[in-house]
């Protein structure tokens, strides 16, 4: 893709355990903030795509009451029940259709209103898996981690190290919810055991929040300052967790390969300056290094040990703290895109990495990262 | 392969018992109920576009935030209506209308408001009700501080 769709504005509410306002008011804050950031008025929006979830919101067609706060009153609006990174895909395709020039994309949810692991249980196969209460999102991730550790030789210490890196990075990100400045792997490993090998600090904390961005067509982007261009995008879905190998993120690799071919990236490890990865659990970041082509298959642990993905490494990953710093369902993947765009624009403040020209952003949905979405972003 | 003979139902439940959604509407309507003790109806007004919401609401379609309580009148106009009670359909029983007693309810736009409240219209024959008919809120003898306080109208 060459200057067809650009990110021209972004906003994130603080990510917090309890927003203490309705989701409508939370979304209103995000919408007003993103329009201000882009420097446009509501009237200029051609299309709006939101990411939210009927089950989490407690009513079907849960975007119905977001019409006003999302700025979509009497406008072309739709939603996806997945991560916001997929809502962005939908908005990009709408712009590429030629029918729309400016789109608002928004992801949001409030974990404070529901019991944490229930939504994951409702994703399970209803005939055999749901009623036995063995599988939930955490236990399924534990099975994924275990399979990956066996195949790759990655250790609990390395997985803990990833979490420590991200929690420390999150301490420089003002919107993150969970952060531990100077976190070390020992502390992560010694935190509350959930399902082995996963401990509490290896799991992305569920929280409340909303984030949004404004997209513009190549034609419309000319009037905006510092557009961040979408150089490529790719997505792929895999089968249910019991019907695929859990030791590799195959659908993420397919998504990345497709995305890279559009973006002209032949060697991600040398051509990508920074990545924001949606790691719902620490081990998924290591698996993503491999699927995203930052290192060879099954070498994620060694790549991490090299220090390459630290803030001062050659390919920093999750300088924002990633989802381990804040995990809002339907928003955290879109937040990765926003963080990557902020880095390219040089607006990431205390967690800014110098010289970011090309960045990768990743979103996922489903148990054990069943669906994956990858973007390559770049400046002028 | 023919599956029909062995296809069965599987028990399941959607456990909503632990969800606790948040709404500002409780606080806003509380202010309205409080004012009703002094025989006033309070809606709220958007500072940006002037839309008056009754019932009051914290966010506006123009992205403004209604922050000023304004009085609306207890008289209004029927904008739409329906009559039921002579029949019902499966799964729905009309408490008042089950015995064939007509039940009329209408979208009533109280004077000064830009939005409607769904109210039961009493003291009138169904054939006499129509869009544009003027009505007045029937103030309850005893206020309950609940939406039912705002549920009944009579022709003006």
Image (spheres, coloured by chain):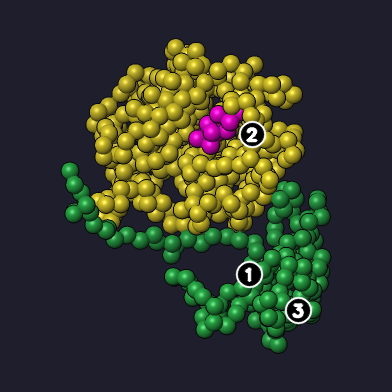
Chain colours: A yellow, B green
Q: Is residue A380 visible?
A: yes
Residue A101: image location, x then y, percent:
67, 29
Badge 2: chain ID: A
* Kind of element beneath mark 1: strand
In the drawing, what numbered circle is on residue B155? 3
Question: Marks 3 and 2: in contact by CB < 8 Å?
Answer: no
Label 3 element class? strand
| Camera-side residue of B115 and A317 | B115
Q: Which residue is mark 2?
A: A103
Query: Compared with residue A362, is residue B40 higher up or lower down, i.e. above or below?
Result: below
Residue nearest the observer in this picture, B5 or A260: B5
Q: Indicate whether A376 appears above or below B49.
A: above
Q: What residue does disc 1 label?
A: B82
Residue at mark 1 to residue at mark 2: CA–CA distance: 39 Å
B113 lies left or right of B98? right
Q: Main secondary structure of the magenta part?
A: helix
Q: Magenta region: which residues?
A: A85-95
Q: Is residue A266 left or right of residue B60?
A: left
């Amino acid at each position: 893709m060459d200057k067809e769709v650009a990110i021209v504005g972004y906003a994130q509410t603080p990510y917090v355990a309890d927003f203490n306002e309705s989701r409508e008011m939370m979304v209103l804050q995000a919408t007003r903030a993103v329009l201000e950031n882009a420097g446009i008025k509501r009237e200029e929006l051609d299309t709006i795509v939101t990411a939210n979830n009927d089950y989490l919101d407690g009513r079907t067609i849960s975007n119905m009451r977001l019409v006003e706060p999302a700025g979509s009153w009497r406008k072309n609006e739709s939603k996806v029940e997945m991560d916001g990174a997929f809502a962005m895909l939908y908005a990009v395709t709408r712009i590429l259709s030629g029918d729309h020039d400016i789109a608002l994309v928004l992801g949001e949810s409030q974990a404070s209103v529901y019991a944490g692991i229930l939504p994951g249980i409702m994703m399970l196969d209803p005939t055999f898996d749901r009623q036995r209460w063995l599988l939930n999102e955490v236990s399924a991730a534990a099975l994924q981690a275990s399979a990956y550790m066996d195949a790759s030789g990655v250790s609990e210490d390395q997985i803990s190290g990833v979490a420590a890196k991200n929690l420390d990075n999150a301490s420089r990100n003002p919107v993150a919810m969970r952060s531990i400045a100077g976190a070390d792997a020992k502390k992560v490993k010694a935190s509350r055991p959930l399902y082995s090998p996963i401990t509490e600090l290896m799991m992305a904390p569920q929280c409340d929040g909303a984030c949004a961005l404004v997209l513009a067509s190549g034609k419309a982007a000319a009037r905006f300052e510092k557009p961040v261009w979408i150089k490529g995008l790719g997505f792929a879905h895999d089968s249910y967790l019991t019907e695929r190998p859990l030791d590799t993120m195959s659908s993420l690799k397919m998504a990345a390969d497709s995305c890279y071919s559009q973006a002209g990236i032949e060697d991600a490890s040398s051509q990508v300056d920074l990545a924001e990865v949606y790691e719902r659990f620490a081990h998924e970041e290591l698996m993503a290094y491999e699927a995203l082509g930052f290192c060879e298959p099954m070498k994620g642990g060694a790549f991490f040990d090299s220090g390459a993905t630290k803030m001062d490494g050659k390919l920093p990953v999750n300088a924002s703290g990633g989802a381990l710093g804040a995990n809002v369902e339907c928003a955290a993947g879109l937040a990765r895109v926003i963080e990557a765009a902020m880095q390219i624009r040089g607006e990431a403040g205390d967690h800014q990495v110098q010289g970011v020209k090309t960045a990768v952003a990743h979103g996922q949905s489903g148990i054990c990262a069943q669906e994956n979405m990858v973007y390559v972003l770049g400046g002028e | 392969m023919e599956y029909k003979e062995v296809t069965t139902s599987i028990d399941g439940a959607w456990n909503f018992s632990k969800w606790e959604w948040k709404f500002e509407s409780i606080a806003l309507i509380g202010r309205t109920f409080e004012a009703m003790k002094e025989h006033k109806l309070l809606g709220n007004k958007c500072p940006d576009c002037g839309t008056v919401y009754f019932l009051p609401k914290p966010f506006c379609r123009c992205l403004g935030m209604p922050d000023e309580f304004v009085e609306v009148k207890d008289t209004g106009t029927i904008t739409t209506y329906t009559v039921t009670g002579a029949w019902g359909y499966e799964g729905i029983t009309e408490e008042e209308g089950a015995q064939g007693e007509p039940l009329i309810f209408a979208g009533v736009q109280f004077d000064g408001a830009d939005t409607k409240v769904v109210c039961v219209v009493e003291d009138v024959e169904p054939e006499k009700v129509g869009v544009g008919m003027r009505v007045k809120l029937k103030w309850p003898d005893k206020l309950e501080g609940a939406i039912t306080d705002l549920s009944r109208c009579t022709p003006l």
